[in-house]
Image (cartoon, rainbow, N blue to C red):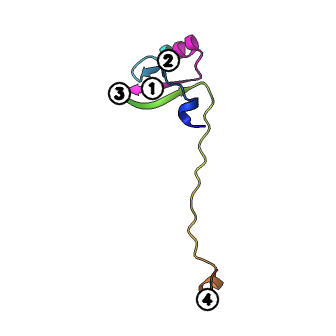
Amino acid sequence: MRVQDVMTEDVQTISSTNAAEDAWALKRRHGFHHVVVTRGSRVVGVLSDRPVTAARRWTLKHRTPHRKRHTATGVW
């Protein structure tokens, strides 16, 4: 299955300069869970009725390899 098989093609957008009440009315009128917010022709956000939690950031911890690996011979 590809994204194009499950995506919505007729996307309703609202300008970032519109009132928030207009965006909520658009969502209610069409039964949307999300509305794409634009500034000009550029997408700048998504308005959602789902709670958004802080994204968990995964950081790569740079560690030196174990000392035995430096002295090991052969493939490890």
Q: Disc 2 residue type?
A: Ala
Task: Name the quadrant of the N terminus.
Answer: top right
Mark 4 vs 1: CB contact within 8 A: no
Tell me the number on the disc at residue 41: 3
- Secondary element at image label 2: helix
How far across and how far down the image is residue 31, in percent? 60, 15
Q: Disc 1 residue type?
A: Val
For label 2, count other residues whose C-alpha is less than 10 Å away and answer few (under 14), some (14-19) or many (20+): many
For label 4, count other residues whose C-alpha is less than 10 Å away and answer few (under 14), some (14-19) or many (20+): few
Q: Quadrant of residue 28?
A: top right
User: Which residue is labeled 2 in the image?
Assistant: 23
- Secondary element at image label 4: helix
Q: Quadrant of residue 50?
A: top right
Which segment did they paint magenta? 23-41
Q: CA distance from mark 4 to mark 3?
A: 58 Å
Tell me the number on the disc at residue 71: 4
Residue in the foreground of this view, choosing between 9 and 18: 9
- Secondary element at image label 3: loop
The vertical placement of 32 against 66, above or below, is above
Q: Nearer the viewer, mark 4 or mark 1?
A: 4
Q: CA distance from mark 2 to mark 4?
A: 63 Å
Task: Give the tally of numbered discs.
Answer: 4
Q: CA distance from mark 2 to mark 3?
A: 17 Å
Q: Nearer the viewer, mark 2 or mark 4?
A: 4
Q: CA distance from mark 3 to mark 1?
A: 10 Å
For label 1, count other residues whose C-alpha is less than 10 Å away and answer few (under 14), some (14-19) or many (20+): many
Residue name at image x 48 percent, y 14 percent: 22
Residue name at image x 39 percent, y 21 percent: 17
Tell me the number on the disc at residue 45: none
Query: N-terminal of the two: label 2 or label 3?
Result: 2
